[in-house]
Image: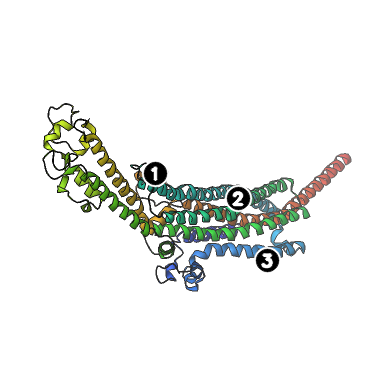
């Protein structure tokens, strides 16, 4: 019997390992088998309920299938065992036949008790650590989604507003652009986060309490087995105690079904995130990205900021044309024209981008006759060949007689160019948002960041919460599955122990009676002699 039990245990362990490995090989939900292409109208429910997709992934349901079989056996098979025990139908299977069998049965029974107790401790660790990891990881995902992802869009909106504000005016002029696209994104993501935290996250807390209580009480019940074994309890007491094991076996078997299904869901979900980073077909690429294109529109904002950049560039060149011309003669037609216009600038309409403004200003310099007069604050040099606008802003002086405020002119030009630079920077903030993959990646980064092959590229701040949730589901599913088997083993131990311990009591009483008879015989012989 012992060899048969060990063989069955080894085969069961092998099957469990293979099914667990099969489940962890799940790459994604494989919705691309159902959908024809990227579209916001793709239905996730249709994907999950598609018979073709379900049939093609049958191997991923082996682990939940075994858990379901254990649950069915526990619910319907174990009551038959209890009925047989009450009717004494199983006496031949569990009752030792002789003195030799009693010793062997006691040895095997203690072996199973030790195994059950060790497994109970391991199950307790898996359940407690797994549920804590699950709750903490889920909480961190929601926390980062609120304080990292949503905060990014809020900060970007604030930065764009700051950059587009013209502080050269008094009072500063706020930008005339529509930033409502940011409000749509933050409101949509924020409302979903709030809904999940208020309506669904409470179930994670409830699961944590239930798992810790069920796991702790279940392990305590298993440890009580040692008391029964040491006290050699017989009769109805072990059988009644095994009824508690039956109740917990049903609970553990049911929860094992739930969490083995969650293993499949977690591996498929994390696989979808990986497919997003690889830009391969999946739920993200074929549903969320098209949905994002329909829901969030930053193209209008980009057009407005681009137009504002053109206006700012033109304004900067207009400011420059107030103080420059293309004739290296002073005084010319305007006494304020103290600079030579760079790139032969004569019309501000030619300045359309920041690059145009930078090229023109860098090529602008003070007229030759005014170079060393205006750029008076020279250090380490006697004469200056050219005095650019940037150098003039630092070294020039403002004269009152004649009225030439060269330093002020240079600063006004730089301020105008600075505003154009700010608008160009704001445009660089908006440009990535035109690609919905960028927005989806921002959301995905709060769940799982892509892993790189080399360890030197790994940052301590990398987010791998999806992997943590996935590991937690494996711990919980395996813990409850093994726990259900543990309680089934506990029922066997209590039922067999009630016979073995009873036989041991009878053997001890018989031995005591035989010893008493032997003592009487010896006393009789001694008195006769």
Q: Which label is found at residue 76?
A: 3
Q: Which residue is mark 2?
A: 205
Query: CA separation, marks 1 and 2?
Result: 30 Å
Q: Residue at x 52, y 61 (%)?
A: 15
Q: Nearer the viewer, residue 221 or 303?
A: 303
Q: Is residue 235 visible?
A: no
Q: Is residue 205 left or right of residue 285?
A: right
* Left or right: residue 510 compared with residue 497: right
Of callouts 3 and 2, the N-terminal one: 3
Question: Closer to the camera: disc 1 or disc 3?
Answer: 1
Q: Position of residue 369 (x, y in %)?
A: 11, 35
| Disc 1 + disc 2, Cβ < 8 Å | no
Secondary structure found at label 2: helix
Measuring 65% from the left and 55% from the top, which residue is drawn there?
487
Give the spatial CA distance, label 1 vs label 3. Answer: 52 Å
Q: Earlier in the sequence, mark 1 or mark 2?
A: 2
- Viewer-side residue, 111 vs 196: 196
355 vs 489, nearest the viewer: 355
Which quadrant would the C terminus be assigned to in this image?
top right
User: What label does residue 164 carry, if any?
Assistant: none
The residue identified by callout 1 is 459
* Depth order, front residue of 302/74: 302
Residue 254, image quadrant: bottom right
Please tell me which of labels 1 and 3 falls first in the chain. 3
Question: Could you say where residue 442 lies in the image, as x and y percent from the top left?
Answer: 42, 53
Q: Where is 427 relative to 286, above or below?
A: above
- Name the spot of residue 263 as percent of width and height, x first: 52, 58
Q: Can the viewer see residue 342 in this picture? A: yes
């Amino acid at each position: 019997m012992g060899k048969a039990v060990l063989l069955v245990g080894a085969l069961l362990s092998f099957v469990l390992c293979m099914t667990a490995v099969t489940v962890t090989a799940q790459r994604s939900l494989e919705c691309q088998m159902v959908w024809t292409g990227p579209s916001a109208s793709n239905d996730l429910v249709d994907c999950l309920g598609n018979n073709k997709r379900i049939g093609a992934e049958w191997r991923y349901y082996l682990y939940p299938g075994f858990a379901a079989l254990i649950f069915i056996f526990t619910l319907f098979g174990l009551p038959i065992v209890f009925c047989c025990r009450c009717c004494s139908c199983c006496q031949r299977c569990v009752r030792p036949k002789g003195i030799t069998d009693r010793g062997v049965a006691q040895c095997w029974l203690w072996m199973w008790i030790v195994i059950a107790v060790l497994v109970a401790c391991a199950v307790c660790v898996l359940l407690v650590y797994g549920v804590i990891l699950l709750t903490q990881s889920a909480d961190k995902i929601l926390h980062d989604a609120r304080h990292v992802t949503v905060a990014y869009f809020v900060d970007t909106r604030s930065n764009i507003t700051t950059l587009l504000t013209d502080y050269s005016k008094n009072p500063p002029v706020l930008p005339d652009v529509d930033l409502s696209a940011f409000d749509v994104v933050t409101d949509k993501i924020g409302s979903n986060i709030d809904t999940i935290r208020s309506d669904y996250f409470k179930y994670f807390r409830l699961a944590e309490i239930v798992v810790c209580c069920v796991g702790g009480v279940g392990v305590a019940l298993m440890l009580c087995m040692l008391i029964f074994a040491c006290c050699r309890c017989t009769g109805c007491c072990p059988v009644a105690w095994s009824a508690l094991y039956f109740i917990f076996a049903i609970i553990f078997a049911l929860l094992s079904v739930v969490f083995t299904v969650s293993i499949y869901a977690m591996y498929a979900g994390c696989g979808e995130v990986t497919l997003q980073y690889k830009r391969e077909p999946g739920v993200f690429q074929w549903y969320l990205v098209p949905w994002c294109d329909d829901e969030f529109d930053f193209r209008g904002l980009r057009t407005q900021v681009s137009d504002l950049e053109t206006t700012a560039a033109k304004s900067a060149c207009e400011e420059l044309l107030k103080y420059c011309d293309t004739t290296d003669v002073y005084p010319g037609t305007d006494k304020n024209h103290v600079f030579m216009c760079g790139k032969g600038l004569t019309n501000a309409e030619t300045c359309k981008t920041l690059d145009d403004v930078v090229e023109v200003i860098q090529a602008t310099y003070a007229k030759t006759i005014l170079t060393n007069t205006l750029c008076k604050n020279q250090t380490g040099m006697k004469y200056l060949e050219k005095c650019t606008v940037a150098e003039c802003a630092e070294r020039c002086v403002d004269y009152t007689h004649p009225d030439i405020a060269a330093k002020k002119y240079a600063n006004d030009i730089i301020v105008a160019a600075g505003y154009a630079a700010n608008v160009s920077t704001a445009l660089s903030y908006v440009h990535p948002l035109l690609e919905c993959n960028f927005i989806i990646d921002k959301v995905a980064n709060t769940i799982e960041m892509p892993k790189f092959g080399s360890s030197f590229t790994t940052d301590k701040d990398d987010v791998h919460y999806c992997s943590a949730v996935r590991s937690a589901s494996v711990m919980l599913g395996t813990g409850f599955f093994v726990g259900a088997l543990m309680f089934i083993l506990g029922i066997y131990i209590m039922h067999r122990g009630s016979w073995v311990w009873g036989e041991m009591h009878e053997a001890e009483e018989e031995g005591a009676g035989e010893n008493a008879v032997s003592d009487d015989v010896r006393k009789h012989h001694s008195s006769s002699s």
